[in-house]
């Protein structure tokens, strides 16, 4: 059993001075110090540092680390067709595994305890997640070129065969990379499995306009008409959503995953945060992939989401740091189906991070939440714990592999693919 004490704790009701005890994979106790303490295997004096739930990266493509700073400075569709898709065609299971490991190290060091990953060679992603002790939810990246009958095996395989740290949701890449026949088939699958569905949605103006030209409605309207949202789910980016689209998201209880850095770098546009919040749309936060961001940094995402809201509204009062922090932590957990990882509370999974509050960028501590969103960065992460296991602490990784060897292998495969 591990005891955390002598520091603030970010709980659902706010910041407290409670202790947190971890037993196995779960949080056993949250509350004041007790007179009769159990025997602890380790006691961690936080010394004023903040203990909080880990960030949930609710949209990413981990294996794209090999394209970091190699696929830049083009709008989305040219970026995909000229830089990304041709390079990805040369991926192998072995190279993908090497690239995923780099992303996982970055997640762990940055306080991310789970990712919602849409990529290729998913057995490799699941294996690394299981072996390292990191939590991953896999989302299918099916396109028109795939055999969609494999959706059943995908869903069953990753929800049962890799242990409790790996799970799956139904998903496809986007409306513009599939067709109505495939989507009708997916509707049949999701109804049989009673499963939520996810995809890229309304990321660019041309994507929405082209969908209207093909189907007479927006992507969100099309998916809803086909019954894809009957069991929940949501979309990534969701920039060019109409009022009717946002109404569908609110009515269906869907989640919009915000990806501000990627949207800004690709000049895709601004998420309609004010309108979405007014309608009660659920929110989560993701980095998108390391080729379109290029960092896997949830602090930067939170900051830019709030800044973009202010710029869009031309109002410095726009944005809500507390709302976006909750989206980055608990909203992502709920979107990914990780409802036992969404908070620090007794019985929840011990997916937690320690934030160094003694660094200059966190002083003075006038408002913990605003410090995290407006001035926090990955250097503040002192510890990352997933399911009660410390994976990173004070600059050292505990994943069973040497980071230098991971980086060297990824570099080797990158040179082989990109030249």
Image: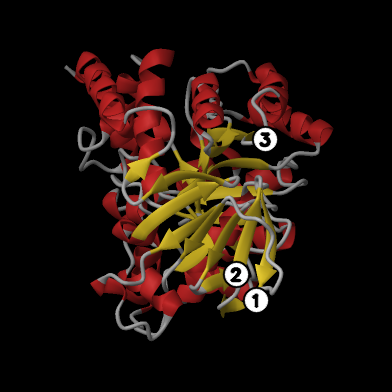
Q: Is residue 55 above or below residue 10?
A: above
Residue located beneath label 1 in the image: 32
Label 3 Cα neighbours within 10 Å, binned few <14 / some 14-19 / many ≥20: some
Lower sequence index among marks 2 and 3: 2
SS at badge 2: strand
Q: Is residue 244 above or below residue 130?
A: below
Where's the C terminus, which quadrant? top left
Residue 98 is labelled as none
Image coords of residue 119 (percent x, y): 47, 29
Seen from the viewer's position, the closer of residues 27 and 82 is 27
Residue located beneath label 2 in the image: 19
Label 2 Cα neighbours within 10 Å, binned few <14 / some 14-19 / many ≥20: many
Q: Is residue 261 visible?
A: yes
Seen from the viewer's position, the closer of residues 391 and 130 is 391
Residue located beneath label 3 in the image: 164
Label 1 Cα neighbours within 10 Å, binned few <14 / some 14-19 / many ≥20: few
Q: Closer to the observer: label 2 or label 3?
A: 2
Lower sequence index among marks 1 and 3: 1
Q: Quadrant of residue 369?
A: bottom left
């Amino acid at each position: 059993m591990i005891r955390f004490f002598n520091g603030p704790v970010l709980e659902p009701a706010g910041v407290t001075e409670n202790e947190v005890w971890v037993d196995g994979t779960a949080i056993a106790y949250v509350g004041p110090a007790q007179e009769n303490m159990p025997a602890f295997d380790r006691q961690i004096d936080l010394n004023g540092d903040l203990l909080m739930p880990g960030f949930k990266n609710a949209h990413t493509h981990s294996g794209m680390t090999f394209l970091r700073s190699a696929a830049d400075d083009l709008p989305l569709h040219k970026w995909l067709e000229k830089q990304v898709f041709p390079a990805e065609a040369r991926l192998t299971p072995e190279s993908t595994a090497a690239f995923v490991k780099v992303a996982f190290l970055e997640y762990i060091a940055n306080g991310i305890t789970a990712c919602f990953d849409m990529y290729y060679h998913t057995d490799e992603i699941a294996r690394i997640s299981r072996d390292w002790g990191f939590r991953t939810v896999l989302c299918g990246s099916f396109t028109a070129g795939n055999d969609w009958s494999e959706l059943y095996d995908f869903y069953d395989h990753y929800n049962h065969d890799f242990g409790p740290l790996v799970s799956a949701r139904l998903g496809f890449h986007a409306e513009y990379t599939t067709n109505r026949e495939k989507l009708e088939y997916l509707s049949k699958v999701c109804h049989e499995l009673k499963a939520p569905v996810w995809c890229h949605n309304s990321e660019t103006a041309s994507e929405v306009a082209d969908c209207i030209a093909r189907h007479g409605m927006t992507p969100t309207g099309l998916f809803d008409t086909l019954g894809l949202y009957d069991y929940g789910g949501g979309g990534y980016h969701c920039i060019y959503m109409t009022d009717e689209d946002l109404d569908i998201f609110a009515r269906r209880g869907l989640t919009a995953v915000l990806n501000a850095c990627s949207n800004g770098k690709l000049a895709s546009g601004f998420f309609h945060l004010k309108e979405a919040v007014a309608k009660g749309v659920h929110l989560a936060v993701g980095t998108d992939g390391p080729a379109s961001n290029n960092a896997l940094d949830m602090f930067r995402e939170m900051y830019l989401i709030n800044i973009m809201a202010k710029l869009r509204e031309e109002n410095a009062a726009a944005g809500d740091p507390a709302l976006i922090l909750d989206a980055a932590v608990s909203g992502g957990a709920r979107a990914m189906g990780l409802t036992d990882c969404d908070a620090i509370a007794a019985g929840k999974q011990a997916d937690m991070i320690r934030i160094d509050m003694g660094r200059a960028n966190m002083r003075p501590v006038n408002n913990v939440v605003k410090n995290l969103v407006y001035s926090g960065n990955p250097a503040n992460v002192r510890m990352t714990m997933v399911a009660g296991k410390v994976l990173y602490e004070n600059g050292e990784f505990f994943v069973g592999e040497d980071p230098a060897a991971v980086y060297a292998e990824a570099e080797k495969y990158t040179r082989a693919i990109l030249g």
